[in-house]
Amino acid sequence: MSSKLWGGRFTGKTDPLMEKFNASINFDKRLWAVDIRGSQAYARALARSGIITSGEAEQLVAGLAQVAGEWQRGEFTLQPGDEDIHTANERRLTELLGAVAGKLHTGRSRNDQIATDVRLWLREEIVALRQHVHQLISVATERAAVEIDILMPGYTHLQPAQPIRWSHWLLGHAWAWQRDAQRLDELAARVNVMPLGNGALAGNPFAIDRLQLAADLDFAGITPNSLDGVSDRDFIAEFLFWATLTMLHLSRLAEDLVIYSSREFSFVKLADAYSTGSSLMPQKKNPDALELLRGKSGRVLGGMTGLMATLKGLPTSYNKDLQEDKEPLFDAVDNLSGSLQIACGVLSTLTPNVALMRAALSPEMLATDLAEYLVRKGVPFRETHHVAGAAVQMAEVQGVPLSELTVEDLQRLHHAFEADVSAIWDFEHSVETRDVAGGTSRRAVLDQIEQLRSWLNR
Ligand code: ARG
């Protein structure tokens, strides 16, 4: 008999190229621990159903623990026929236990096995990723609290628009990450459902108690339909969407910081730990960490699109196409783990250049405040917008900053201007007028900080 799991009905040899083409062991071997955990629980479920004895189950559980030890110590040696992690573990178990090992797969298929393994694996990875997101939000929030006094230009269309607090900019990113954390929590619940007991497609014939098996594996529930259970990869697609959106947020942070750390802006100085030099130009300090965050976001997006394209045309239940789910998933998990920690490192070690941010604020950025001054005197906004525009033009013609126009100059544009207009030529004053919830005033920003802190400490 062939040593292949499915060898019984096959007589011809597999093309060696096909063997390689078919194999997933090179990437799915990282599932070794969850594969063994799932098998141990399954052996116990078989014993509870009475199809194997509890003595046999104990043998299987102990043998599997031995296999796990070999993986753990780096002693597990893959053999040519080890097609995937399930095949490899069962082959080794058979070497250790002999015939009884052949009872482990009773009523089980690699179809419900792999779907279970990936869910067990991803569930743990999500816990680690969730902590990284938490850490990143925490760094942004605490920086925002300490650096609340720093003012900088806010941009729209990347054109200087209005003064804002640096903390407001930091929190703008933090809120996006907070949504990422919420989304991750929500999808984690859909990952934590057990397909084991679905068999190949039609269900388990030996009356195993799936609910008890799920409890043994700490799953919150079981998949309700075996056809769907073996083929559902929504939880991976959803995770990849999460990963893509989170990377997109990191990429946008990175882009801001690439600009802000450029010599022309110099709003922030990146720590040497996250920059590199040029092999050619001695004066260069490159923001490689940020460029990689931006670059990897494209790659994770590609993985998500690839998997969705793989899934879209599949007929009901398991198809081998589904083996293509793991590489993009592993790649996304690895990249997210690295990217979140690097973003956290960059953000916690950069130095804001308070003076240069302040110097980049120009009186023209208060043109809206000039219009708002008149609004407060009862002039309709549309009219005030026009007047403020005329003031900008007048200052340009006179060759002076907007703030240098005299009250008389301004009164020529509108009679409602009075001496108190001089109070608006103050950037601090400008940000403090944006005192609405979600605004950039000190109180509004402190309120955001409190909201995030209490969310973080939940
Ligand atoms: N390596 C396979 C995968 O990742 C395991 C399931 C194989 N099932 C099968 N019927 N060939 O999807």
Image: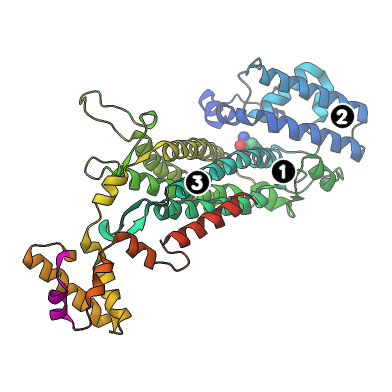
Q: CA distance from mark 3 to mark 1?
A: 51 Å
Q: Amino acid at mark 2?
A: Ala
Check mark 3 vs ligand 1: CB closer than 8 Å? yes or no.
no
Does 436 sit above or below residue 180?
A: below
Residue at the disc numbered 2: 57
**Closer-to-camera residue (328/408):** 408
Can you tell which of label 3 and label 2 is closer to the viewer? 3
Q: Amino acid at mark 1?
A: Ala
Element on which disc 1 rests: loop
Residue 409 falls inside the magenta stretch: yes
Indicate which disc, 1 or 2, sits on the residue closer to the N terminus: 2
Check mark 1 vs ligand 1: CB closer than 8 Å? yes or no.
yes
As drawn, is 275 to the left or to the right of 54?
Answer: left
Residue at the disc numbered 3: 142
Mark 2 and mark 3 in contact (Cβ < 8 Å)?
no
Residue at the disc numbered 1: 200
